[in-house]
Amino acid sequence: MPAMSAAPLLPANASQHYQVEPSDLPLSCPMPDMVLWNSHPRVFLPIEETGSAKCPYCGAEYTLRR
């Protein structure tokens, strides 16, 4: 039997603003801990230079905590 993840997956695109940690890089929307079946295709977002990024598909905004 496969091991179950300790944390449940988050609904994709459930929020419009996410704070991410450097450990979350490279950043993609939806993020790896989100359910993918009801979401848009995964897109990688360049956040390292400016500290913020916006998904072109769903409009979710991401802020990098430094």
Image (tube, rainbow, N blue to C red):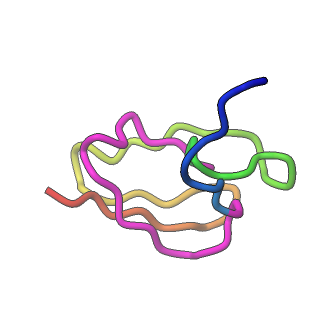
State the quadrant of the C terminus. bottom left
Indicate whether 45 appears above or below 61. above
Q: Please give the name of the residue rendered at 33% of the width and 47% of the height, measured from the top-left corner.
A: 47
- Dividing the picture into quarters, in which one does residue 3 lie? top right
Highlighted range, magenta? 11-30
Q: Which residue appears farthest toward the top when viewing the image?
A: 1
Q: Residue at x 59, y 75 (%)?
A: 15
Expressed as whole percent of the image width and height from the top left, the position of residue 42 reads: 67, 39
Horizontal arrangement in the rendering, residue 33 relative to residue 40 (left or right): left
Q: In this picture, is 6 found above or below 15?
A: above
- Where residue 55 appears, as percent x and y from the top left, is 57, 56
Number of numbered labels in the structure image:
0
* Farthest-out residue, right: 38
* Image location of residue 26, percent across then percent down: 39, 34
What is the quadrant of the N terminus in the image? top right
Coordinates of residue 54 in the picture (x, y in percent):
49, 60
Residue at (43%, 42%) from the top-left corner? 27
Give the camera-side residue of 51 and 33: 33
Taking depth in this image into account, of 10 and 53 the one nearest to the observer is: 10
- Is residue 66 in the magenta section? no
- Between 8 and 1, which is closer to the camera in this rendering? 1
Reply yes or no: does residue 22 show up in magenta. yes
Location of residue 6 with respect to 51 vertically, above or below: above
* The furthest residue to the left: 66
Q: Residue at x 28, y 40 (%)?
A: 23
